[in-house]
Image: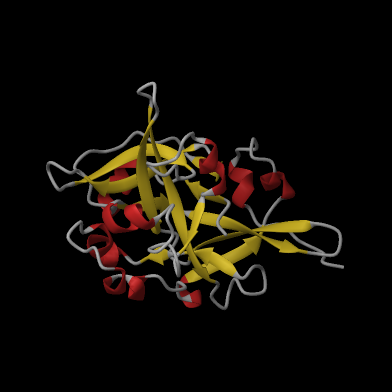
Amino acid sequence: MCGRFVLMTAGRDIAKHFQLSEEPELEPRYNIAPTQMVAVVRLDAETARRELRLVKWGLIPFWAKDTSIGSRLINARSETAADKPAFRAAFKYRRCLVPADGFYEWKRLKKKRQPYFFGSADKRPFAFAGLWERWEGLDGEIIESCSVLTTDSNELLQPIYDRMPVILKAEDYDLWLDPTVKKPELLKHLLKPYPSEEMTGHPVTSEVNKATYESPDCIKPVYVHED
């Protein structure tokens, strides 16, 4: 599961990394939580260029009667997403990148759940494999939303949690976004645990447990006594 993540890289650097034609205005976010607005990179249907848009985190299928289902669909298991009714259409037609600088997972200790922060070893931003959807209500309300794909944990995360977000390598962005690629079997090789040696992780303050807590302190290492 991926339940919180971080995006603190400046807009100009996001534009460079994701090859965007425009520099987005982004405020540093240190504790992004489900149902909040998040940045996604996708292809513009008319220009076929990459664009960054803000959508709601928690996918609302186009066929949903209301928006309440979104809070339960923040993640999609990469092993089954292409076949699940909630994600099937998005997997085929509406894949996206979710820019991030890191994410949190929680380790269950004897008396509490301890948050850990994980990021890339080179401190550069990366992208989760994501799906996005467009929902229209009976009153004409339109909501765009997304979900983050997950996979088995790599060796670094295994002691903490058994799942992790699918992190794509930059050279695979084009394939993941390519609208002409519709067969899941052509994408499955991308949906694997990210190499442990290219990541770092450390325990962080329990303040991260509060979705309202936003501070650079969220990602600072702390000492944890696990007894």
Observer able to see residue 66 = yes
Residue 116 rendering spot, x and y as whole percentages: 65, 59
Q: Which colour scheme is used?
A: secondary structure
How many labels sit on residues?
0
Observer able to see residue 96 = no
Q: Quick one: quadrant of the C terminus?
A: bottom right
Residue 8 rendering spot, x and y as whole percentages: 46, 45
Outermost residue to the left: 47
Residue 19 rendering spot, x and y as whole percentages: 22, 51
Quarter holding residue 122? bottom left
Residue at horizontal 20%, vertical 56%?
179
Residue at horizontal 70%, vertical 46%?
209
Q: Is residue 29 above or below residue 192?
A: above
Q: In this view, does 186 lie to the left or right of 114?
A: left
Residue at horizontal 34%, vertical 52%?
90
Residue at horizontal 27%, vertical 53%?
93
Residue 136 rendering spot, x and y as whole percentages: 36, 31
Outermost residue to the top: 139
Q: Which of 221 and 67 is in front in this view?
A: 67
Q: Is residue 155 left or right of residue 188?
A: right
Q: Quick one: quadrant of the N terminus?
A: bottom right
Q: In this view, does 226 lie to the left or right of 122?
A: right
